[in-house]
């Protein structure tokens, strides 16, 4: 059990060190191949000089053959070096993954998306509970790099759920935790790619590619493209041996191939557009999908992410291989040679035609699976990093019971945990207390752990059970100059929304922090009292934090429907000590006068 921060850091630090060692070794190998490439280039120049100075047919033939040898070796060297560079990138990405985890455990910002784009002040609880944005719950959890992974996590933190889905996700997260070591490699394969690129490829596979490769269905074209390499090789060898007119025929055939490529250039460009340079992306996604396919998953939630039993990773690797071949056209000299003598572009288009018939639609759908796994892996990583957190019990009957409930965004060495239990029948729990004593933090602690629970994630508690609530909050109400909305008007709008929601959702759970701050004290008290009594009548469980001690007297009028709690301070001389522990009853100690005196106001 990794209980302390240091315990959790050690595995990541060891893994990061291993990656640094791998990277050093691979970099040396890449440098050696770079030297070999330069040497081959010099050898090729020497052979070319030999060919240029030859005067006999035999010498010309020998030097021509020798010219091919460095090229053949060069191709092998480039292929090997590309493989090493791919490994180098992968291990760098893996090192980044481990260093990011180390940084987060040390209190640094997450290198993944923080979900700022999902912020919504009109939402029932998002802005009040720090769900999205910097230093948010989303920033704590997210380990997704794909668009679907990012959006799916946001959806589970911002929308309602049900017991079956929550329990299914809990089981899936626990199962993924069993493979946590390999999930880091899964994440490394997805690191560093453009978020929108895979979406563009999916769209091309689903809506464009079939029409674009339709011209390759021509039987004569397929047959000719298949025979051309053998025909050109025969003419080349014949020219070397017999010379004369055979070289002319060879040149004429090359020209004919160039013209045929030109005739189909528009169709070829359409097929190639969108795939250019995407082979590494597709290879990485193929590795990631292969990881999802190699495990015998037990949880139904994960099993349902597979829309087919057929493994699509092989199809993606095949597509990546075709794109690598197609990318050869990016080299102008190679483009001419390959198309004049091998009809390379048409060959690649035909390959894509065959591939599309067999696998295009399957791959387009299968790529989505990566994002769904990313979101679950984000949750599994949270579970791994916070092993002392527990999965809550979801009840059918009205309940909320938590022991040692803490705020997940507060470091464990600074966090103070509290117990909290709702009665069998809903109550309005009024929390009074001093400034900075912990009232607002406690409301957010209850709210944010509820959001975690409904997302199927572990919660920051030693024990928690709850039923499904419709969570509604009223905390950070702000004015809006653009919409000409004052603070008081904004508060009224929020209250109106809450009243409308509690009428529709009998399972609502309301969290309110200091209501009606934008008006005078009498209207504030009258409005707060009326609102509390409305919630009592509707039997809506509520946590109501306030500085107004008068509101605590409502317990006398509604002894079965109102409970009082408080956060207080201990005064040592003029020094204040906060324990941040919630206690029974209304508050009796306040600190506003002391704080005013400290800044020079008051006697």
Image (tube, rainbow, N blue to C red):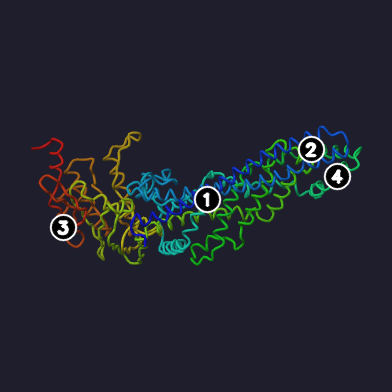
Viewed as shown, does residue 597 lie left or right of 210? left
SS label for mark 3: loop
SS label for mark 1: helix
Check whether the beta carbons of the residues at disc 2 and disc 3 lie within 8 A of each other. no
Mark 2 or mark 3, whichever is nearer to me: 2
Residue 22: mark: 1
Earlier-in-chain disc, 4 versus 1: 1
Viewed as shown, does residue 436 lie left or right of 409? left
For disc 4, the marked residue is 237
Residue 493 visible somewhere in the drawing: yes
Residue 220 visible somewhere in the drawing: no
Q: Considering the image in quadrants, where does the N terminus appear?
A: bottom left
Q: Please name the residue shown 43% across and 43% down the image.
A: 117
Q: Looking at this view, is 55 or 390 the one in front?
A: 55
Q: Looking at this view, is 114 or 481 the one in front?
A: 114
Q: Please name the residue shown 44% across and 54% down the image.
A: 14
Check whether the beta carbons of the residues at disc 4 and disc 2 lie within 8 A of each other. no
For disc 2, the marked residue is 258
Q: Outermost residue, left direction? A: 603
Viewed as shown, does residue 595 lie left or right of 140? left
Earlier-in-chain disc, 4 versus 2: 4
Residue 206 image position (x, y, % from top left): 62, 50
Mark 3 surroundings within 10 Å by alpha-carbon count, few (fewer than 14), some (14 through 19), many (20 or more): some
């Amino acid at each position: 059990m990794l209980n302390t921060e240091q315990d959790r850091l050690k595995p990541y630090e060891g893994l990061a060190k291993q990656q640094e060692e791998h990277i050093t070794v691979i970099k040396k190998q890449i440098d050696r191949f770079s030297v070999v490439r330069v040497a081959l280039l010099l050898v090729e120049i020497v052979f070319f000089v030999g060919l240029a100075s030859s005067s006999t047919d035999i010498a010309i033939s020998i030097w021509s053959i020798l010219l091919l040898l460095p090229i053949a070796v060069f191709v092998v060297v480039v292929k090997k070096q590309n493989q090493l560079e791919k490994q180098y990138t992968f291990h760098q990405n893996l090192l980044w993954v481990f260093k990011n985890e180390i940084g987060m455990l040390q209190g640094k910002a997450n290198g993944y998306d923080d979900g700022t784009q999902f912020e919504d002040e009109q939402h029932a609880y998002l802005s009040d509970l720090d769900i999205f944005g910097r230093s948010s719950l989303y920033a704590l959890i997210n380990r997704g790099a794909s668009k679907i992974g990012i959006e799916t996590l946001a959806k589970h933190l911002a929308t309602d759920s049900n017991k079956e889905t929550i329990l299914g996700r809990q089981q899936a997260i626990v199962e993924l935790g069993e493979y946590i070591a390999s999930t880091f490699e899964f994440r490394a394969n997805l690191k560093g790619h453009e978020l929108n690129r895979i979406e563009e490829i999916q769209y091309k596979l689903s809506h464009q590619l079939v029409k674009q490769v339709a011209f390759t269905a021509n039987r004569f074209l397929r047959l000719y493209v298949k025979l051309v390499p053998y025909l050109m090789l025969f003419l080349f060898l014949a020219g070397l041996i017999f010379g004369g007119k055979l070289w002319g025929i060879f040149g004429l055939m090359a020209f004919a191939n160039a013209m045929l490529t030109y005739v189909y250039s528009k169709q070829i460009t359409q097929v190639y557009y969108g795939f250019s340079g995407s082979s590494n992306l597709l290879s990485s996604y193929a590795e990631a999908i292969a990881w999802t396919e190699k495990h015998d998953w037990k949880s139904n939630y994960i099993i349902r992410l597979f829309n087919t039993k057929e493994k699509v990773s092989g199809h993606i690797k095949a597509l990546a291989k075709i794109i690598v071949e197609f990318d050869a056209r990016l080299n102008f000299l190679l483009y001419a040679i390959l198309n004049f003598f091998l009809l390379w572009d048409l060959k690649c288009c035909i390959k894509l035609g065959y591939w599309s018939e067999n696998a295009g639609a399957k791959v387009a759908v299968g790529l989505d699976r990566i994002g769904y796994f990313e979101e679950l892996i984000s949750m599994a990583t949270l579970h791994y990093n916070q092993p002392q957190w527990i999965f809550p019990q979801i009840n059918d009957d009205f309940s909320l019971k938590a022991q040692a409930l803490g705020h997940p965004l507060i470091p464990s060495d600074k966090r103070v945990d509290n117990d909290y239990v709702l009665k069998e029948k809903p109550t309005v729990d009024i929390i009074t207390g001093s400034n900075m004593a912990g009232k607002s933090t406690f409301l957010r602690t209850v709210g944010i752990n509820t959001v975690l629970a409904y997302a199927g994630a572990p919660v920051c508690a030693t024990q928690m059970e709850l039923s499904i609530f419709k969570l509604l909050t009223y905390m950070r109400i702000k004015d809006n100059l653009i919409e000409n909305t004052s603070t008081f008007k904004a508060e009224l709008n929020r209250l109106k929304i809450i009243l409308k929601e509690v009428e529709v959702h009998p399972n609502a759970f309301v969290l309110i922090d200091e209501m009606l701050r934008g008006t005078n004290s009498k209207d504030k008290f009258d409005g707060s009292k009326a609102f509390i009594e409305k919630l009592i009548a509707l039997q809506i469980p509520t946590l109501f934090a306030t500085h107004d001690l008068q509101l605590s007297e409502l317990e006398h009028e509604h002894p079965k429907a109102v409970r009082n709690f408080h956060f207080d301070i201990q005064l040592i001389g003029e020094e204040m000590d906060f324990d941040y522990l919630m206690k029974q009853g209304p508050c009796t100690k306040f600190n506003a006068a002391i704080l005013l005196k400290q800044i020079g106001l008051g006697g």
